[in-house]
């Protein structure tokens, strides 16, 4: 079974540019989460999809961040325009039924310079 | 919302000793508590989890205890080995929203 896959693994962009991160969850997983870890701090929740619907987007920091999950399969997270404080590792995770194991992707390390 | 606190932030132990990491949570509705291990450059992976209807769970050298009344849960690693060195995250999840709230992580170093 393929795991959660994220692209790219690393991205270095200049302040003001746009970056789009992609997550391919485990096939059949309805729940898809985006998390971010900044500078060795906690893994902080950004948002949660159930299929193609946003179940909870309370963790999105501001309107520069836009997440989509068209068709309920893969998801994208766009940051536009990127700011320095957006640097960090962005993790995607997926899970099947409620309150079961969340499988993580390898993360995308975003550096905004 | 839920607030998960994790201590200590760093922990060094001699090989063969035990390591204990503690987490507290604030939302009494949380009922699922997984622990993740993240090795350097790799993705977080589940190592053990516990649900609120159980007080303790063990898997070989790893055990987790849960005190619902006090709202805290702990990870215990016995007979530590160098390959146990990693960052460990606790998390809490409940019925509402089904998202996972993570602790700040504990960097464990096992000294050979």
Image (spheres, rainbow, N blue to C red):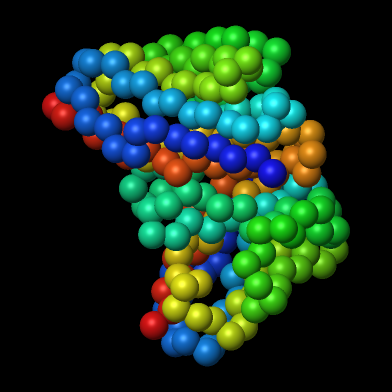
Q: Is residue A112 left or right of residue A55?
A: left
Q: Is residue B20 left or right of residue A54?
A: left
The quarter of the displayed image where residue A14 is located: bottom left
* Total residue callouts: 0
Quadrant (top left/top right/bottom left/bottom right) for the N terminus of chain A: top right
Q: Position of residue A20 (x, y in %)?
A: 61, 76
- Above or below residue A90? Residue B73 is above
The quarter of the displayed image where residue A63 is located: bottom right
Closest to the observer, B33 or A31? B33
Q: Position of residue A4 (x, y in %)?
A: 61, 51
Closest to the observer, A68 or A25? A68
Q: Is residue B15 left or right of residue B68?
A: left
Closest to the observer, B47 or B90? B90
- Above or below residue B94? Residue A15 is below
In this view, the residue farthest toward the left is B112
Residue at 55% in and 10% down? B56
The quarter of the displayed image where residue B11 is located: top left
Q: Position of residue B31 (x, y in %)?
A: 70, 25
Residue at 77% in and 54% down? A56
Q: Is residue A99 visible?
A: no
Quadrant (top left/top right/bottom left/bottom right) for the C terminus of chain A: bottom left
Q: Is residue A113 visible?
A: yes
Residue at 58% in and 85% down? A81
Residue at 38% in and 53% down? A40
Closest to the observer, A26 or B2? B2
Q: Position of residue B97 (x, y in %)?
A: 78, 44
């Amino acid at each position: 079974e393929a795991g959660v896959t994220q692209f790219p693994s690393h991205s270095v962009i200049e302040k003001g540019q746009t970056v789009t991160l992609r997550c391919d969850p485990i096939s059949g997983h309805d729940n898809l989460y985006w998390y971010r870890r900044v500078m060795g701090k906690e893994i902080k929740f950004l948002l949660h999809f159930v299929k193609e619907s946003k179940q909870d987007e309370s963790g999105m920091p501001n309107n520069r961040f836009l997440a989509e999950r068209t068709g309920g399969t893969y998801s994208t997270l766009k940051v536009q325009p990127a700011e320095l404080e957006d640097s960090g590792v962005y993790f995607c995770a997926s899970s099947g039924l409620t309150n079961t194991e969340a499988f993580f992707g390898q993360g995308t390390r975003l550096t905004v310079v | 919302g839920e607030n998960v606190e994790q201590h200590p932030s760093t922990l060094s132990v001699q090989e063969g000793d035990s390591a204990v990491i503690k987490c507290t949570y604030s939302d009494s509705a949380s009922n699922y508590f997984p622990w993740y291990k993240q090795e350097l450059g790799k993705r977080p992976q589940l190592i053990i989890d516990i649900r609120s209807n159980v007080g303790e769970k063990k898997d070989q050298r790893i055990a987790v205890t849960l005190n619902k009344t006090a709202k805290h849960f702990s990870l215990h690693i016995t007979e530590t080995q160098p390959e146990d060195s990693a960052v460990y995250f606790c998390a809490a999840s409940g019925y509402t929203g089904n998202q996972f709230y993570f602790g700040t992580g504990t960097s464990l170093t096992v000294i050979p």
